[in-house]
Amino acid sequence: MNKTIKLLLADDHPVVRKGLCLCLAQHPHLQVVAEASDGKDALRKARDLSPDVVLMDLDMPNLNGLMATEKLRRDLPDIKVLILSSYVNTEFSLRVAQSGARGYVLKEAPTAELVQAIEAVAAGRTYFSPEVARVTMDQLVHGGKDATEPLLTAREREVLSCIARGSSNKEIATELGVGVRTIETHRERLMRKLNIHSVAGLTRFALAQGLVSLRPRDGLPEKKQR
């Protein structure tokens, strides 16, 4: 390609950003114009610099990548978003597509695949890593007419994020402004829907879905930002 593609790297791990910069530096038509350490930082720098593509990690503090992508689609629709993640999860990949991201590449992908994805997204096409595309298509083909509908409601996701954070039923009820019995009902429904019957299992599911983030500084899941 002759046209230079301006990139914004959004990842809260400096080592990951450094590695991406080194890999992409081998391709003269790819120019990293800035780095961001969290979702809010990514939005601010995207507004200031107008990159062609944002390489967006999903699990970031302050504002996760999924919510940052939704805000970019609404406020800066000309900027393309390419998600970088280690997760291969059916519902999650569907939510990424619905968020407005133009692509989804696994962090384990070779550099050549990442470059191919960047070029495709910058040109207005889409690119999903083969593993992600496979599980998504399997769900769309075999999951029935409602396959694109989220498994959990918005309120169930809120309750799940609070459970994963370690809040009690009473604390969740106070935070969400509902009765304790309502939260108990949501908890029971979550376990039945997900076939998960422990708080530890619900927490792992919430982490995989990007609803909470496990921050290294305190070892506790952090509630996603709204």
Image (cartoon, grey):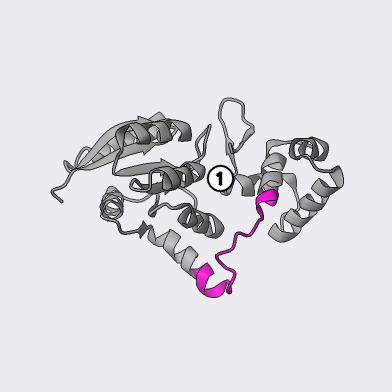
Q: Along the line of sight, which residue is nearer the eye, 77 or 120? A: 77
Residue 46 painted magenta:
no
Above or below residue 183? Residue 21 is: above
Q: Sort mark 1 into few (<14), some (14-19) or many (20+) by Cα contacts within 10 Å.
A: many
Is residue 151 in the magenta section?
yes
Residue at (80, 46) in percent of width and height: 183
User: Residue 163: x, y in percent?
Assistant: 72, 41
Q: Is residue 63 above or below residue 125?
A: above
Residue at 16% from the left image edge and 41% from the top image edge: 28
Looking at the picture, does residue 138 appear above or below residue 202? below
Residue annotated with mark 1: 210
Residue 143 is situated, as x and y percent measured from the top left of the image, at: 57, 71
Tell me the kind of residue under disc 1: Gly
6 relative to 170 in the view: left or right = left
Magenta residues, as a range?
A: 138-156
Q: Is residue 168 above or below residue 120?
A: above
**Image side of residue 118 versus residue 153, left or right:** left
The answer to which image quadrant residue 223 occupies is top right
- Residue lying farthest right? 181
- The residue lying furthest to the front in this view is 75
Place residue 225 in its image quadrant.
top right
Foreground residue among 28 and 179: 179
